[in-house]
Amino acid sequence: MTSRTTLRSAGLALLAALALTSTPAAAAAAPQPAWHGVWAASPQSPTAPFGPNWSTQGFDDQTVRQAVRVTAGGTRARIELTNRYGSTPLRITGATVARTAGGGAVEPGSVRPLTFGGGRGSVTIPAGGTLLSDGVPFTTRALESVTVTLYLAGPTGPATFHHFAGATSYRAAGDHRSDASGAAFTETSTSWYYLSGVEVSGGPAAGRPHRRDGIVAFGDSITDGVGATNDADNRYPDELAERLAATGRPRPVLNHGIGGNQVTNDVTWAGEAATVRFRKDVLTEQGVGTVILLEGINDIGGSGPAFPGGPTPDVSVNRLIEGHRTLIRQAHAHGIKVVGATLTPIKGSFYFTPENEAKREAFNDWVRTSGAYDAVVDLDRAVADPADPDRILPAYDSGDHLHPGDAGYAAMAGALDLDEL
């Protein structure tokens, strides 16, 4: 798989040049560290389908503090920032990384300033662009929480973000990027803004510079973790990362789920179709060797009147299957193994109709029997009620009969065969 470049957006040669060292000769001579993604969130366009958030207005002379849990450790760290859906250039006045202390606070003495393009404290990301910071010495361990703080001195306009963070982000007026205290951070949100990745190098990975043991969980709200307890890291990819760490050999697990996303249709508030965004969100990740593909329930249920924002075009089982075959081809072309997952139960939810259930069962039968994937995990049976297999087991149900709760997500992670990942 081609390694992620400092600047992903094609044609932005100026920013690509900023990422180099001072001279071509120095760049050629410098040792190149092996970077590995250890946390991720798929970018979304500014929207507020379920109530206010900070994406639609953006920021102006404000500091945003965001805590994320990394899934593998290293001795250096860098962050990925994105303006993928911005309509104007985004100025990052300054950024820091620190160890999380909770409630908007960070551990005293742990704050490290981040630079860009070989030492610049500020950077401008063009509309549509995505870039990486310079690496900074910063030792991390698997399952440790780190806090990224961004100071945005001027008006940003609407912000590229990730809607369902499953975690609390904090905002303060003015420049508080280096504060250890969380006292100034009086506003909160449950989304992530501009931050789309954390990568590390060194540590356990240093002796295996070309390893590709990263795992991407790709899908919709059930991968995104809707229904899990906020700030508890109980989504199924989180639980999978914990299982792997418990073996003594942690592996990076990156969550590229978007609530409401579909395989075949673009959704204004839930991202581009999976067949389009897969190239941007998965194939650009460093060190990934496996993707778990769990998506399609919104294609099936989205044509009904209950879908937020209004119905999307009807999708046949054959069209959904072809969408999955497209994703499999994209992954295999980059040497990535694909684990296919069956769609979890919907009986009792706002998606349930006899027609939709027939589609779900037909698609799941194809997943189990087609041989299209490198491996299959039967998440349908992992969370189904044995007494009523079309329904989520009550103990696993978040309450809406569509999304699992914490126990359901743990059961999903537990159903994965670690030897097949």
Image (cartoon, rainbow, N blue to C red):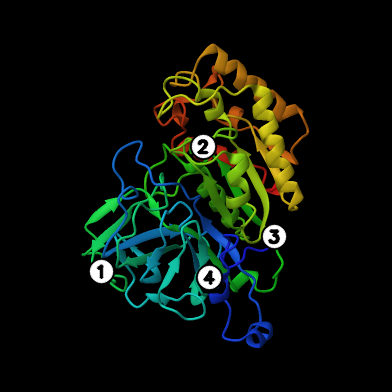
Along the viewing direction, whichever of 168 and 130 lies nearer the viewer: 130
Q: For mark 1, what is the residue?
A: 181
How many angstroms separate mark 1 from mark 3 (CA)?
38 Å
Query: Does residue 141 appear in the picture of this structure?
Result: no
Query: Does residue 378 appear in the picture of this structure?
Result: yes
Which quadrant would residue 249 be assigned to in this image? bottom right
Q: Are marks 1 and 3 in contact (CB under 8 Å)?
A: no
Give the secondary structure at mark 3. loop
Q: Are marks 4 and 2 in contact (CB under 8 Å)?
A: no
How many angstroms separate mark 1 from mark 2 (CA)?
37 Å
Q: For mark 4, what is the residue?
A: 15
Disc number placed over residue 212 in the picture, else none: 3
Q: For mark 2, what is the residue?
A: 261
Question: Which x, y percent locates residue 108?
Answer: 32, 75
| Residue drawn at (56%, 48%) of the image | 240
Disc nearest the viewer among 3 and 2 = 2
Earlier along the polypeptide chain: callout 4 or callout 2?
Answer: 4
How many angstroms separate mark 4 from mark 1 (CA)?
33 Å
| Amino acid on which the number 2 mark rests in the picture | Asn
Instruction: Classify residue 41 as left or right of residue 363.
Output: left
